[in-house]
Structure formats: structure tokens, C-alpha cells
Image (cartoon, grey):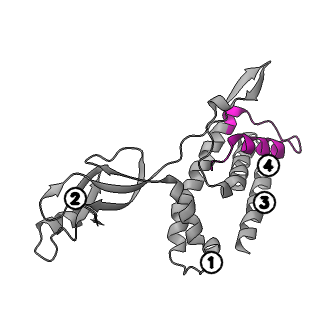
């Protein structure tokens, strides 16, 4: 389920105005919101790489690796693509050719395998693939092909707190609103990151420090 951008905006405003620290306009909020969402999304891949080195536990709900996988599933997709990989493909994590998973090789390794001997040449049971400058090449022993079944991640869509201006005041309008696609567990993280950006823009370092403090508290709670 999507995270309501109006809920996030109201929480941010409440915290920012708690000590009269300044008003965050809808335009500023939308800018901060998209930046925060993108940072959280990209952090998933870094965290996934880190926890891959740590053994999991038998409890799915407490296993960080499983939690990250659950958050990333929102952005997973698959399609037959090629030869040019579309710009909406953020990261490819698997390629299949005729139902068989491909080894994704660097350009030089791919070329060496194609021109190598029987031990390195691709076969129908051991296909190889290469992506260079968004161009896909696949080989399975019968020449080079230019399409495959691609498993990939897309980036979150841009969010927007929609509004109409009435008597010089911005009023929430769901018609023009685009909510966050992130997992619901990221609500607090979004609030803290947006507050931190707002503190910089409003030249209120205490607001940024407050946001960092709240985020640190949340991080400590998650480690317990």
C-alpha cells in the first residue's frame, strides 16, 4: 500500500512549526520529498549488499535481508527486452534466455567467451549476456541474439502533494496528488529526511539537528 504524501506533509509541517521554525511551501516539500524517496530507494541496494555478508536467522520478520527484499519487491518487474534497454530500467538483477538464467559478463569477458574454445563458449544450457551502453547481447551457442527475459528494478515514480490555491492559501487536492511508492515502514524515515532538507533551506540548523536526532533514535530502536 502506498504512503499518503498528505500524511507525510502534515507531519513535517507539524514538526517544523512546533517551535515556529518556518513554513515549508508545497513546492519545497515536493522537491524534498522526491529527493528523500530516491535516497531511501538507492540505500536499499547498498544495505542489501552489506547484509548479504551476514547470516540470516530463522525468523523472517526479523531478518534484515528478507525485510529489504520485501521493500524492493514493490519495484521489481520483468519483460522481454532488447536490444536497447529502456531508460526506465534502473537495475537488472537477472537475465533469462529461453528459460535458462544467463551469466552476465563484462564486455571483454563476453567477447573472449564467444571467441574461445569449447570450455568457454556459451551453450543452450549455459547462455551468457552482456550489457554495454544500454545495449543487450545474449549468446547461447547459436550466434548473438539481442533480446532476453529481463528481471529488473524500476525507480519510484515522482511524488507530488497536489493542491489548489484558494484565498492565497494552498489547499490539498487529491486529484493532482501522487503518493509515495515506498514500503509503509518508511514513513518515519521520509519525515526525518524531509525535515533535514527543510532545515537547510530555511537556514534553521536546529531543525536539521532535530531531524537527525529523531532518525538516530529510530535507528537505535531498530537495532534492539
The CA span between labels 3 and 2 is: 49 Å
Q: Residue 121 in the image: x percent, y percent?
A: 15, 70
- Badge number at residue 138: 2
Which tag is nearer the camera, tag 3 or tag 2? 2
Regarding residue 136, the answer to whether it shows in the image is: yes
Residue at (76, 28) in percent of width and height: 171
The CA span between labels 3 and 4 is: 10 Å
* Residue 54 magenta: no
Which tag is nearer the camera, tag 2 or tag 4? 2
The CA span between labels 2 and 1 is: 39 Å
Residue that numbered label 1 is attached to: 59
Instruction: Judge from the rendering whether residue 126 lies leftward or rightward of residue 201; answer left or right.
Output: left
Instruction: Give the crowd class for mark 2: few <14, some 14-19, many >=20 residues within 10 Å.
Output: many
Q: Relative to 212, say whether 85 is above or below.
A: above
Residue that numbered label 4 is attached to: 207
Which stretch appears magenta?
A: 1-29
Residue at (56, 79) in percent of width and height: 56
Instruction: Give the crowd class for mark 4: few <14, some 14-19, many >=20 residues within 10 Å.
Output: many
Q: Relative to 168, say whether 89 is above or below.
A: below
Regarding residue 104, the answer to whether it shows in the image is: no
**Of callouts 2 and 1, the N-terminal one:** 1
The CA span between labels 1 and 3 is: 30 Å
Of residues 3 and 36, the one nearer the viewer is 3
Amino acid at each position: 500500500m502506498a504512503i499518503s504524501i498528505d500524511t507525510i506533509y502534515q507531519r513535517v509541517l507539524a514538526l517544523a512549526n512546533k517551535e515556529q521554525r518556518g513554513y515549508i511551501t508545497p513546492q519545497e516539500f515536493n522537491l524534498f520529498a522526491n529527493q528523500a524517496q530516491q535516497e531511501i530507494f538507492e540505500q536499499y541496494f547498498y544495505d542489501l549488499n552489506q547484509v548479504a555478508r551476514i547470516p540470516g536467522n530463522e525468523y523472517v520478520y526479523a531478518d534484515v535481508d528478507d525485510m529489504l527484499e520485501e521493500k524492493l519487491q514493490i519495484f521489481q518487474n520483468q519483460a522481454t527486452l532488447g536490444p536497447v534497454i529502456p531508460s526506465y530500467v534502473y537495475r537488472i538483477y537477472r537475465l533469462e534466455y529461453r528459460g535458462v538464467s544467463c551469466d552476465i559478463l563484462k564486455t571483454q569477458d563476453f567477447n573472449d567467451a564467444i571467441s574461445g574454445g569449447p570450455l568457454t563458449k556459451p551453450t543452450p544450457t549455459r547462455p551468457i549476456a552482456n550489457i554495454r551502453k544500454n545495449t543487450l547481447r545474449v549468446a547461447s551457442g547459436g550466434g548473438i541474439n539481442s533480446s532476453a527475459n529481463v528481471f529488473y528494478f524500476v525507480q519510484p515514480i515522482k511524488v507530488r502533494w497536489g493542491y489548489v490555491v484558494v484565498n492565497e492559501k494552498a489547499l490539498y487536492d487529491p486529484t493532482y496528488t501522487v503518493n509515495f511508492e515506498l514500503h509503509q515502514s518508511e514513513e518515519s524515515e521520509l519525515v526525518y529526511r524531509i525535515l533535514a532538507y527543510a532545515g537547510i533551506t530555511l537556514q534553521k540548523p536546529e531543525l536539521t539537528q532535530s531531524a537527525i536526532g529523531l532518525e538516530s533514535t529510530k535507528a537505535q530502536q531498530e537495532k534492539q
